[in-house]
Amino acid sequence: MSVGTPAATEELRGLVEEFIASLELTPELGGQQESMRYALAGGGKRVRPVICLAVAEAAGARPAEALPAAVAIELIHTFSLVHDDLPCMDDDNERRGRPSAHVAFDEGVALLAGDALAAEAMLLALRYDTPEVARELARATQGMIGGQYLDITGGGGDLAELHRLKTGRLFAASVGLALWLAGVPEAGQGSWRAFGEELGLLFQVVDDVLDGDGYAAELGPEAARALAHEVAARASARLAEIDADTSVLEGIVRELAVRTA
Amino acid sequence: MSVGTPAATEELRGLVEEFIASLELTPELGGQQESMRYALAGGGKRVRPVICLAVAEAAGARPAEALPAAVAIELIHTFSLVHDDLPCMDDDNERRGRPSAHVAFDEGVALLAGDALAAEAMLLALRYDTPEVARELARATQGMIGGQYLDITGGGGDLAELHRLKTGRLFAASVGLALWLAGVPEAGQGSWRAFGEELGLLFQVVDDVLDGDGYAAELGPEAARALAHEVAARASARLAEIDADTSVLEGIVRELAVRTA
């Protein structure tokens, strides 16, 4: 495997796509499964699960061991998008160039699709012997929901806190789940977790630069771009503190910093 | 503690109410907590958590040990009610004589309240060392969602399967979670689980008799009442197979069979 290059992350992304394509959902969901698969197949970049796999590998686990946790995070992310798109939330009829789940199916089915994606994510996280993987996922889900709440209710104007919760908590969990499943003891998780916090912020700032809102609107596009570079540098500095081969993660930081979509 | 009488179940219900009243929700949920507490305080009969506590006690655990699991089931039940009441589902503006969550707050906040109740339930179930408690809860949640899906899409006309999933799965889980946390080995769970299946059916048939729909509409009120008695007798027969003091559970079967609200 080539390391530290986009090729390495492409390989991990391929593993994620394969796992999702062959994922057996709970049989009792019956016809509900179709809307879940529709939402999951939306062609996202799988950034969060790729990070989870890369952290797990750097921390000494095999990617195959990390796949259930990695895909659990993608399911939580997808659940949040399906619910965010509903008319009572952002009311978005399109998601990544396709009709949103509630347009392709109907609102009730989309609501249940989100609910079921969240529970299926927990089942994936519960495949591990240690309950810490599932605990971290459930806590991150609550943080994300706290962020969505701030978003729809006005949020008291604290943009940083809103994004730390709404976007950042799942990025942080991508790192955190990998640490638990790789058996990294809590005392050795500090730099890893600090890295995860920076990753979430980096993703959000670049997102805002590309969309011209959020941080770009608040700081201006130039200052937001400069902030992104700063955050990327901080993320790399955290990786440098870690006694492991983090070159694939270095590559992910670079990819996130310069992405154009 | 008086045993086998309504007083015993009242005592257990009191423990459930106390636990819910003092339950700390995930701090990052912030202002979202208010809608969750509103939905939880709706004055339900707490049937599922009381069953969970009674099974746990009969199987040798202390009620205090069983409270997180018992209340986890109540949170999943409440999550399902909040989402069921939304305009895109049953569109019910009232729940137990109070405005539904989406009326008291707004639709987006109610949607998130349901999501967060589900994740908080998982965190409660994850307080146990064994991941089986949380696994059983997540699987039951999926079964319940499968039942909601049948309900809103017409369901192929199989009323028994619809109710086995939508109502029955959480009743079965009330028994199942208690078995895991009390350390009942899988090989010894058969009669217990058969009892749980009957309980769910009993609850639903009596519900339909009281509301004049479902089984009462399909079979006629007399035949539905007769079915309820039959199911209650089967539930008691299952209890008789179990080598434990199941008198409180006998009392619950009687209460469920003759309830008028």
Image (cartoon, coloured by chain):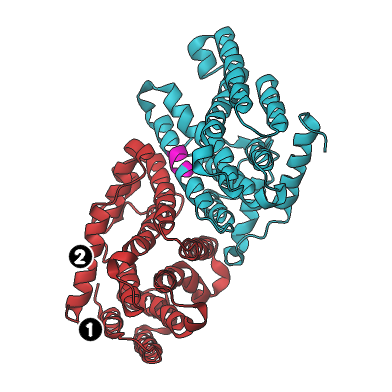
Chain colours: A red, B cyan
The reply to whether discs 2 and 1 touch (Cβ–Cβ < 8 Å) is no
How would you classify the magenta stretch by its main secondary structure? helix
From the viewer's perspective, is A222 left or right of B111?
left
Q: Please, is residue B99 above or below residue A149 in the view?
A: above
Q: What is the x, y in percent for residue A196?
A: 42, 78
Q: What is the x, y in percent for residue B237?
A: 60, 21
Whether residue B103 is visible, yes or no, is no
Figure label count: 2
Q: Quadrant of residue A255?
A: bottom left
Helix, strand or loop at disc 1? loop
Q: Quadrant of residue A31?
A: top left
Residue at image coords 35%, 74%: A56
Q: Is residue B144 magenta?
A: yes
Report the magenta residues as a range. B140-145
Chain that bears disc 2: A
Chain that bears disc 1: A
Residue B181 or A81: which is nearer the viewer? B181
Q: Which mark is residue A4?
A: 1
Q: Quadrant of the C terminus of chain B?
A: top right
Q: Is residue A208 magenta?
A: no
Q: Quadrant of residue B252?
A: top right
Residue at image coords 72%, 27%: B251
- Crowd around label 1: few <14 · some 14–19 · many ≥20 (10 Å): some
Q: What is the x, y in percent for residue B98?
A: 68, 38
- Crowd around label 2: few <14 · some 14–19 · many ≥20 (10 Å): some
- List the residue tagged with mark 2: A14
